[in-house]
Image: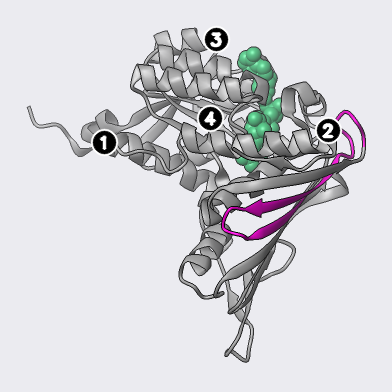
Amino acid sequence: MMKSVNMEEEISMLKVGLVGAGGMGAVHAAALAGMRGAKLVGVVDAREEAARRLVEQAGVAHYTSLDELVSAENPNLIDICLPTDLHKEYAVRAAELGKHVFCEKPMARSSEEAQAMVEACRKAGVKLMIGHVLRFSPEYRTAKQMVEDGRLGRVGTVRMIREGAAPGWSAWFGDNKRSGGVLLDLAIHDMDWLRWTFGEAERVYAKLAGTEQGLPGEHAVVSIRMKSGVIAHITGSWAQPDGFRTFLELAGTGGVAKFDSADTYSIKTTLRGEERLTHQLESPLEPDGYFHELQHFIDCIASGTEPSVNGEDAAQSLELALAAIRSAETGQVVFLS
Ligand SMILES: NC(=O)c1ccc[n+]([C@@H]2O[C@H](COP(=O)([O-])OP(=O)(O)OC[C@H]3O[C@@H](n4cnc5c(N)ncnc54)[C@H](O)[C@@H]3O)[C@@H](O)[C@H]2O)c1
């Protein structure tokens, strides 16, 4: 019997089980709604009202445990949008059940947990990807490309800012044992981009201001020397009264490039030999990094290729953030091994 095109499409659709229907769960569910080759089939959340919102929108069922979701829907992959300290438990269980794992950043709360996730996925022969979204955000991708194309010459310094109000929508962010505070939860975005663009870090020095226990008001300044010699300065802040802003400045022998989310253009470059500023506009109608990262993982599963932010890679970004935390705690420079 000839299958109809719709049936073919339906069969090739990867089934996604979402665990965690909070802030990021909603973002992922919205991204999955427009995705090629995948569909959401069920949602797990301990809070019924959070799950209800998503399941009604997507027309799928709510389950109270991962095992229940897996036995009812037999998904191909599990998308984990839980508080950070729960990532390991759910990623390992999903792998044991033979499911590919997409997990929000930061990968885990400790190196040991990250290693357990890598090991469980390796043993089960499933793929693991961590949601380091800057690698899929148009402005940060363009900035990396400018570095690789040599448009800025030899880059010497990088300044990055990620600042906003404390994430007051969930209490667990305020418990450093669960979230790792602003260094692990927020500044890790910029640390991962630095590693992706310039290679590994050599040493890190960090200072935390604000409260001792994370929320509200934790504010961090981090200085990193990369093995390549690039010096980076990151500000990560939950101490702003409101809003959210990101900033990136790259300075090299060929000129300076800046991106500020508060500006109307996306990247402004002042290159030697060019008399005017270059504005590169990205359309706000373009899909965002959350869409692109999930689409990338779906495509990797379908094609059998390795995701660009696999577990081993993301574990290195976790190491850097944990080293920054150790530096802030001890007041010492921490060397990466
Ligand atoms: N990539 C990004 O830009 C970005 C932004 C924000 C948060 N995050 C990360 O995403 C993850 C989730 O953050 P969030 O803002 O969505 O948090 P959240 O608190 O809004 O959502 C977490 C959800 O998990 C549910 N939950 C908690 N324990 C559970 C359990 N044992 N079983 C089932 N459900 C449970 C909660 O009810 C809640 O709905 C965190 O690791 C965070 O660091 C990433």
Q: Name the residue under label 3.
A: 65
Q: Determine whether label 2 and label 4 are within 8 Å by CB.
A: no
Q: What stretch is highlighted in magenta?
A: 211-235
Q: Distance between the residues labelled 1 and 3?
A: 29 Å
Distance from mark 3 CB to nearest ligand 1 atom below 8 Å = yes
Q: Earlier in the sequence, mark 4 or mark 3?
A: 3
The residue type indicated by label 3 comes to Ser
Which residue in the protein does label 1 denote?
Answer: 9
Q: Which colour scheme is used?
A: one colour
**Lower sequence index among marks 1 and 3:** 1
Q: What is the x, y in percent for residue 264? A: 69, 69
Dot 3: element: loop
Q: Nearer the viewer, mark 1 or mark 4?
A: 4
Mark 1 secondary-structure assignment: helix
Q: Where is residue 244 in the image (x, y as percent from the top left)?
A: 77, 51
Q: Where is residue 215 in the image (x, y as percent from the top left)?
A: 86, 33
